[in-house]
Amino acid sequence: MFFDGNAKKRPQINLGGSRNLKDKPALLRSNQERRLARQYEKKRKESATKIQAFVRGRTIAKKSRASIRLEWDIEAKNYLNSNSSPPVAALNLVLLVRKFLFFYRPFQDVERETLLCYLLTLKRQDTILFIHPFLYDDIRDVWTYQTKCLLVLFLRRFGSHNLHPNFRVTLLDYVNLIRSATDESNYLQIRDEFCRKKIVNCLLEHLIQQGLYRELSNHLLGLPVDVPSPTIPSLSHLSTLPFRNLSADSPVLIPSIHAFITEILKMPFLMYRIKQELSAFTAHIPIDVVMTELSTMSFKTEEGLRAGTGTELILSTEEAAGLLSNILAFTRPEKMASLSKFAINKGITLDDVMLAYLEVLKNLFTLIPTNALSNKKANNTRLLWWIERFFKGPQLASIFAFATSSSGSTSLLRVCNLLMALMSRWPLKKQQLLTSMMKRFSPDKKDTYVKMIWEGFTAMELYEKINERMFPTAVITGELAMMGGKNVKEDILEQCHDPAHAQQWEMLALLCELFSRVLLTTGDDEFFEDGKNPLNLGEVIKMSACLRNVTFALYWNSHFKMEYVLEGTCIQLTYLRDILTKVLQQIHARDSRRQFTETGHWLMASQMDMASFINEAASYEQGAEDLPPKSGPRRIAPISHRIKILNSIPFVIPFEDRVKLFRKFVQNDPKRPYNHYRIRVDIRRTHIFEDAYTYLSGLKEELKDRIAISFIDQHNLTEAGVDGGGLLKEFLTLLCKEAFDANRGLFVTTKDQLLYPNTLRYAQEEQQLNYYEFLGRILGKALYEGVLVDFAFAGFFLSKWLSRSSYLDDLPSLDPELYKGLIILKNYEGNVESDFGVNFTVVDHELGVSRIVELIPNGANTPVTNETKYQYVFRVANYRLNTQINKQCKAFFKGLSDLIEPKWLQMFNQQELQVLVGGAQIDINLDDLRQNTVYSGYSDDDTVIQNFWNVVSCFSEEQKRKLIKFVTSCSRPPLLGFGELVPKFAIRNAGKELRLPTSSTCFNLLKLPAYPDEKTLRAKLEYAIDAGVGFDLS
């Protein structure tokens, strides 16, 4: 603190060095970077050393190869001119080849390669030169190794086609050398047979491992398809050589088969490329093992199509078609009837081979895009030729024979899978194939194929699961067990998505395709006759129960992805649902005409809340604006599928509920204005049809409006009365009665007095078609207003209302004699062409003039044969039931559709439509009538009313119908009972006079005088209804 006399500041000395201000992480990072830099520098120096060594080595090797090439050229020429002893020559050949293998480069040494190939093929002392070294034990192993290397080089040259034509050898010499090297007969100088076989197998196995089939394939693909080549015989020989030389337990057998499949067998047009050697080639293929191995593969196309499970094989569409064609060409029945040594060694049976064959064909058909076979390309034409040959030749017959002779259901399942795959990929030939299958399957008994497939399906696990899940208590009675509703329907959907059952669904689909085809040409009498129907009625009932439940579940769950393709098949859920629906409708139509099921068999009402179903379906039909406010896509979707159920399988819903729903549709129709009368029409009673057509034919949807009718009597005076609905009913009743009268000529009747459009050509004239369209609207107005008409239509005509065609089963109602003749022709087992002498024409008779109509192009010159008789029967029935009345039906339905939505009508079948139009053919329920009767001037306990009901209760059914017709104008009761009759059935006091009862049918009113006793009432009432006393007529 005090001055010590020293004015200088002393230096500060720190022996610890300068202070490092870096923190610890930075220091560690710096040290790591320096360490990495040192490592990189070390590796760089090591790499430089290796590169320098490699370059020096390559440079020296290049110089060595160049030097050895010069030596080789001299030695090769000397070898050609030398006459050394065989041992010395063999040793020199080994040394010469050793040098060649050392310097050989494919592009640089082509000429030397050809010289060596030429040299090796020379003969000395009747032995090919390359065989000599094998004769001496001390150089045999070395020469075997060298030969393997040489054969691979020659094989690759052969596959590349890269050889100048001026060289001393050709590609044929290359392939012949390879063939000779693998031919045991060239090694006979080696006395040890085991040694000979060892050498040949060693060379062959090495070639297989080094791509024998790949190079053979490359060579084949480089040749024109239809132009013969001199290399083909040797190439064919080499392709099948492994199957002739290898032992059954050879480790390269399966790899060689796989290589043969992937390189040779999948080649497009293989059979055309090797046409000159096709027989020999086919004879040596172990097709049984090839099929077995193919069946374990999973095929996949570049377009994404996949089939099968196991080792994946990726194919182009062209290769898939090529593989299919080749298999069809090489799989002859005689080849499939015996086993190769390889199959026997592997324990493969003939059944295994056939099952594999069916599986492979099915998988390959699955890979072909839909409708690809319909395109007229050159490639497709050749494929189609082999497919046609397959179906017309013995292969298909052997498949069917296998299906019928095999005791297991698996064989039948595979056949069904194959046929379904073919039909899905060749839709234009579908009907022809079904007809072919019908004949193929039934050589002894008609249509036994359907029964066979049905019995096979019922033995499947899928059928057991459906049966167990859906109707465990009773199938035939139609009583459904309550299994939890939603879970039952979802369970069916789960079965559809289960891969284990996918192929079984195909079996069911084929059964339906075939049975549907049978039903098209089977009349009702044949359907119910033993021996004519392939299934007995008990089996049909079981089948319908199965189809009913599955189809219902598919429609109920159709808001899920119905485009889903069942795994390993060609079919979508939509197709499955549609074909099951088609057969179900056909069976139900038979049951509707002549019931063979128990009451309630078709109903699925136990699986749903019917009240909710009706309300929500009606709401959906009315429009989304009428749905509850919170309704979104998830709610709308399932409701819309209830409409699909109503349009496709409506019979699962009770008829009464469907009628209620129909009434709701009409009631909720947004185009139904009911505020006031918009249309007023004066109708002369003497010209009802003419006036109606004049004033109403120009109206279409406007006919939904309220119409005020005023009648003008025969004195041209307007009748008194206010139309409250009764006059419209009377007008519609009288108009329909006059318009549909057969005497007017628009409609004619069957022998059962059922109406259908006139078939004469004048009925197709424009004015007549306008009448049909008008009548369609009038009948639509009657349906719209709930007015019943007192006549019936033919079933085949009603089917047109449902947008369906009629077939053979409807023909008896039109022309029973024609029907009998067609049935005789269809079942005739003799020569149809010579014994019947008919062609594809029909004769129309009109007003004494005959006209010939051809059913097919050039039908007059096309005789009906045993093969085409089913087609003839179908076309004749189609012409009579559909074609002749096509224009008339279209016009009528066009008018009908102006008022009634077609989908509303599709809720009913033909018989139910008739009930909807004209009422039910059931007994009159007097209790129901009395409960829904109103009185004017009387009460229910009045003596006259008591006497009235006593009299009516004693009436016969015919008298009751006369009474109902007397009061309401229709002899049949309303669909849902007299409770829906509008206006209500009414009885009014007509005074005490002893005159006859009268009625006002427009008001459903009976005017009944107060008769003093029951006897008088009976006499007067019977006289009135028998005499047909009408409106206000005493």
Image (cartoon, rainbow, N blue to C red):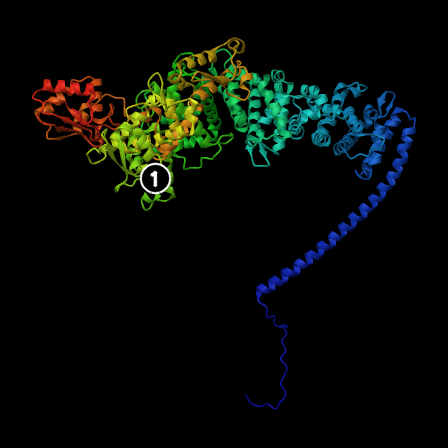
Task: Using the image as rendered, state which of residue 988 and residue 934 is in the foreground.
Answer: 988
Residue 612 at least partly seen:
no
Q: Percent position (x, y) of residue 613?
A: 31, 35
**Left or right: 498, with 266 as reference point:** left
Q: Indicate the quadrant where residue 680 lies.
A: top left
Instruction: Give the total number of marks visible in the rendering.
Output: 1
**Left or right: 78, with 940 as reference point:** right
Q: Indicate the quadrant where residue 656 lies.
A: top left
Check the image and report above or below for 822 versus 979.
above
Q: According to the image, label 1 marks what residue?
A: 620
Which amino acid type is shown beneath numbered disc 1?
A: Tyr
Q: In what element is the residue under mark 1?
A: helix
Task: Using the image as rendered, state which of residue 219 and residue 118 is in the foreground.
Answer: 219
Q: Percent position (x, y) of residue 87?
A: 87, 25
Residue 236 at least partly seen:
yes
**Left or right: 189, with 896 as reference point:** right
Query: In the orientation shown, which residue stands out farthest toward the front?
Result: 715
Q: Indicate the quadrant where residue 878 lies.
A: top left
Task: Using the image as rendered, state which of residue 389 and residue 872 is in the foreground.
Answer: 872
Q: Percent position (x, y) of residue 820?
A: 42, 12
Task: Using the image as rendered, state which of residue 798 and residue 979 is in the foreground.
Answer: 798
